[in-house]
Image (cartoon, helix red, strand yellow):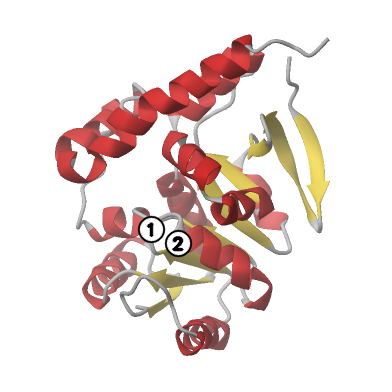
Amino acid sequence: MLKTKTTQQPAVQVTTTPFLHYTLFSGSLDELHSIDKALINTINQYSYCIAEQDPAFKQALLGAEILLPDGVAITASLRFLSGKRIQKIAGADLHQHLLAYLNQKGGRCFYLGASVETLQKIQKRLEQEYPDVEAGFYSPPFKAAFSKEDNAAMIEAVNAFQPEVLFIGMTAPKQEKWGYQFHADLDARLTCCIGAVFDFYAGSIQRPPQIWINLGLEWLGRLLREPKRLWKRYLYYGPIFAVGMLREKFKKTPG
């Protein structure tokens, strides 16, 4: 059985649980308040499968100081493989927690990603819900790959603002690769790659109701709302992930 343990990566000490070749965060989000500097990524069944095909993406996930179990497929698989129970922590949960924390102390955060229109919607909602959070925003160019000039401009925008928390929303795996590549250059205590949370918070995409989330069916709610975009994520990669977990469970031990 895999056991929850406290491990320490450079300058970071948090509660974690091993999951195959990854190390999942399994503590309270309050633990993040005392970390000096960390890159935070999330992993779900889809990103797990894509990372098996994309070494650079896998390295970005492995290189994060904090890896959140963002999906019931991950938490259920951990229990299936090891008997260990941990709580799912979605990017939206991280976002809400950190905003509440920053609002309480009058902190600063920065949103890097999405369109100008989406960022304007985020800013408007922030002003209503978290009035004591000072926020900065930057919409990078929409392209498959950024130029050196693009990267320099994004880093400069973040560092000029000096946020305590940086939220990156460029979709996976682009955001994780970018955050991993430039994490050391960014003047932010916590760098969080949270993807669709930008659209959730802006209201561009509705997150499923809380009852769906509590039942572990958030994935189904998202699939029903965006079948054309998400069908492959859940209906194709879902079975691939499940088969992979079955193989891990029942594979023969050498010797």
Depicted 65 relative to depicted 22: above or below: below
Q: Residue at x 37, y 78 (%)?
A: 140
Amino acid at pointer 1: Thr
- Callout 1: SS: loop
Task: Identify which residue, 18 or 159, lies in the foreground.
Answer: 18
Q: Quadrant of the C terminus?
A: top right
Which is more toward the observer, 235 or 109? 235
Whether residue 98 is situated above or below residue 128 in the rendered picture: above
What residue is disc 2 on? 174
* Residue ID at (47%, 62%): 175
x and y, in percent, of residue 228 in the image: 16, 43
Which of the image's four quarters has the N terminus?
Answer: top right
Residue located beneath label 1 in the image: 171
- Residue 245 coordinates in the image, percent (x, y): 53, 20
Say which quarter of the image contains residue 146.
Answer: bottom left
Give the alpha-carbon distance from disc 2 to disc 1, as whole Å: 6 Å
